Amino acid sequence: MRRFILIVAWLACAGAARASDGGGAVLRQASGLVQVRPEGSDRWRPAGALPRRLAPGDAVRTGFNARAVLALDGGAILETGGNTQIALDDTVRGGSAVGLAFGSARLGGRALGGRPLELRTPTGTARARSESVSWRATVGGGGSAVFEVEDGLVAVEDLRGGALRLRAGERVETDLAGLHEPTQTPSPARARREDFASRMRRELANDRDVDALQAVVSGEQRREEYEQGHVLTDAAGRRVRAEQFVVRTSPTSFTFVALNGRRDAGLSYYSWTGVFDVALPKNLAPVFAILPGSAGAAAPWTLTAFTATSSNGVDTLVSSASGGHQVDLNSNADPLDDVSTLYDPATDAFRNVAGQAVFKVLFDRYGLYADGALKSGVTGTNIQAQSDYTASTTNDPLTGAALATPLSVFTTNASFPDAGAARQQVFTSYQDAAGTSITVDNRSVAFGGGVVSRASFGGDVSGTGMQTGFLRSGFQQSVTASEFGGRSIDVILSARALFETPIVGTPSVRNEPRALQ
Amino acid sequence: MTRSALAVLLLACALPARALEWVPIGGITALGGLHTFEGESGGFTGNLDASFAPAVRLDERWSVLPSARGVYEGTRRLTDVLGTATVSQQSLEARAGLRAVYGDPASRWRFKPFMSYDAEFLKETSDEAWGQGLFDQRRVTVGGEVELLTDEPHSVRAGADWFKAAYPNYTTLESQAAFQFAGQPLARELAGDHALDREGYQFTLAGDTALGQRLRGEAKAGVVWSRFAEQHVIDEGGQFTPDVRSDVLTDLSFALRMPHEWNADLRALGGLEVGLTANSSNQNGYDASRGQFLPGYYDWVEWRVAPSATIIIGAVRRPVTATVKLGWKRRAYVHRPAQTSTGAYEAGTTLSSTEYSGALSLAYPMTGRISLIFDLERASASSNTDFQAFYRYSYQATTALAGVRWDW
């Protein structure tokens, strides 16, 4: 009888215990968006009036910055943070188990009396191993979880069967690969500080993002300047800035300008002003195209006068011509000035025009001046061939003014003085009393400074081979004259501009020393 | 009375001091190495990047982040504009910024006003002195950002700012000629002097999110509108019009990151970035040596793809990381024609260039917060334009660097 009473009493106690530890819970507090999904349902509904009884299998989720507190059967308390989803589990007999799908939760209990208390995450499970216990769990991307024990002893097991025990102040991370090394949990103050530092590091990164696009824009501006040849290095390795543009001075004229700027050396330039017989179109490309000459028929615009100036701001070398008119050089009486190739500025090609009518501009008056002093000149009337010119001796060819000292004869010699370098020197020697001279140095500038090798010209030292070689690189022309007192005029410009400049005089008798022939 | 006043003063000072909490954030990276361009080396030099930002939490809502950064680059990185090909280039950047963060802890929204001042110095050739670089720049930025926390740490951010960038050493030669050669027609009407100075607005939109269990996605969009007040638009005759230049630079980028763990001590991060940058300008080009008008000279589109893989070995806090990153980049100019070797424009063919790059980097943690850093970068570019007298579109460039990084 006594044994029977004991059995009945044990069964009654067990039944009572089962009723109270059945895996359910009571939702006691909710702030913010808290929703419940009953077991078997796939719809989330607001938590409604509290307290609310939750059965095993029910799930609770919270929104941003929301919070929920559940009293689990058996006395343990579960607190969830925002953006969290938990589900009650009844698979643990006589105890409580909660599944944490994502987000963060804190689980704690006192006087557990051996009742199981579990928190399950996608990659690990934590179980209470002491009478009084409290721990936090956070589930992140990929199901990885962090367990931090605040009180008591907690056993953590991963999906691979690995297990370890954590004491108060310890933390461990689990993921699909298993348990990581446990570490000390930072104190609340330190955790808060580290969280703040982490957020501020992100802000600092965002701050730098703002600059990233500006850096792209700045880089582009620098690139554009280089691409257009505005920033160069000259043959001597010095930084040179260069700009080329066209100035429209009147409907019938324009000026091509190549400006250079060097540190501590001011500006230097080459300018060429052309005056035509009729108004020019806005688009000057067809006008540039006929400057070297026109094959087949005369050009619609005739260059009647031009002035070419090289200057370093102190010294000048000026050539000026007037009385320009078009002449078919291949049909005139002088076979020596016949034209066999004609440069096309649009394509940089040298077209074979032998046997065709080729119209070039010949000028009736031409003079070359160094620092204002007339060095040479030619005159004529309705010149029809280069051989028709008369060299000026006692009068200025342009103004007709009498000269104080008659002009002397001169000789011109073009050479490539450096065996391996693409450097041409045109030396004009005047047989005057002072023995004056003008030297023009033409160099093909290597990228980054220096002079390119002669090999890049294919060995050509004259004609179209040399001219094409000068087009492939930056081109620098340096002019010195006895009148300059040791100074020189250095200009980097497109060699093309010098091909287009009308040439007065033949290569054998260079009145225009800057011409590239 | 005096004693009471002092006590009150002390209390007044102590109260805000007690509420303030600050965390120093910063780091120093010192690297030494070499940069070679087309086989030419700029010699052994170094790079230094130092930053310091004392983050201050004023209260639960307000934080401020003053920051200062100094960057010296003696060895060119491959992210620079390489075609300028000055291997001896050195740059120095000093930046000061202030960013505030306002956020109610109960709210998903964060508001962040900011301002910054940036000074950049560039020595492109060995004979240039610091402070006299042609492309030295000063930039002021004032703006704000709003952030919506979606699922921490993921968020969506939108920002707008005003900026003004000035190049104090850059004035056009043409504007100088207008004064120096008075009486001669050496400058066009409306020729501006500080033609590179710009002012405008920048708008950004960025966000990141988890894409399923294994992927993270990031997206960024940015638009920079720049107005060049002293750079007039060129017409088909090569003359300036009353309109001034304005550019719109648009940048879009997307990135996928895929973290993976084999075990606690061996992890990996795969990544794939794709991006598009486009510039649209009302400015044109003009080749004065042949009177050639070049409309839409500054319009271009650039695509890029960059896959990467990082191996992370060791403890989470101090792992050894090794990264391999590859890159492909193609730029196409919408209207600018390609050029022959002499510079003649090729009808029907627009300029384009392609760059392939590869980078290896290794970070090896030493004592405390110090890590050893090794970087090796290589780029190879080609183009359909043969005229490269002023700017190199085709090149081979390599940068190798080694040094230390100290973070705190």
Image: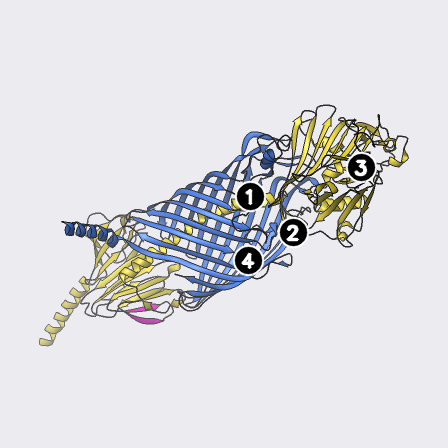
Q: Is residue B72 above or below residue A229?
A: below
Residue A363 appearing in the image: no
Distance CA(mark 4)–CA(mark 1): 21 Å
Chain identifier for the blue-coloured part of the image: B
Classify residue A352 by image quadrant: top right
Q: Is residue A123 left or right of residue A331?
A: left
Label 1 and label 2 in one chain: yes
The first of marks 1 and 2 along the sequence is: 1
Q: CA distance from mark 3 to mark 1?
A: 42 Å
Of residue B2 and residue A140, the one placed in the foreground of this image is B2
C-alpha gap between disc 3 and disc 2: 31 Å
> Where residue A74 sits in the image (x, y, percent)?
19, 63
The relative height of residue B296 versus residue B104 in the rendered view (above or below) is: above
Tell me, what colour scheme is on the image?
A: by chain
Q: Does A158 appear in magenta?
A: yes
Q: Give the mark nearest the N terminus, 3 or 1.
A: 1
Q: Nearer the viewer, mark 1 or mark 2?
A: 2
Q: Are marks 3 and 4 in contact (CB under 8 Å)?
A: no
Q: Which residue is mark 2?
A: A237
User: Residue A272 appears in which quarter of the rendering?
Assistant: top right
Which contiguous range is marked in magenta?
A: A154-168
Residue A221 lies in the magenta stretch = no
Which label sits on residue A511? 3
Give the chain coloured yellow. A
Residue pointed to by mark 1: A221
Q: Disc 4 marks which amino acid?
A: Thr
Of badges 3 and 4, the one in the foreground is: 3
| Mark-to-mark CA distance, 3 and 4 | 50 Å
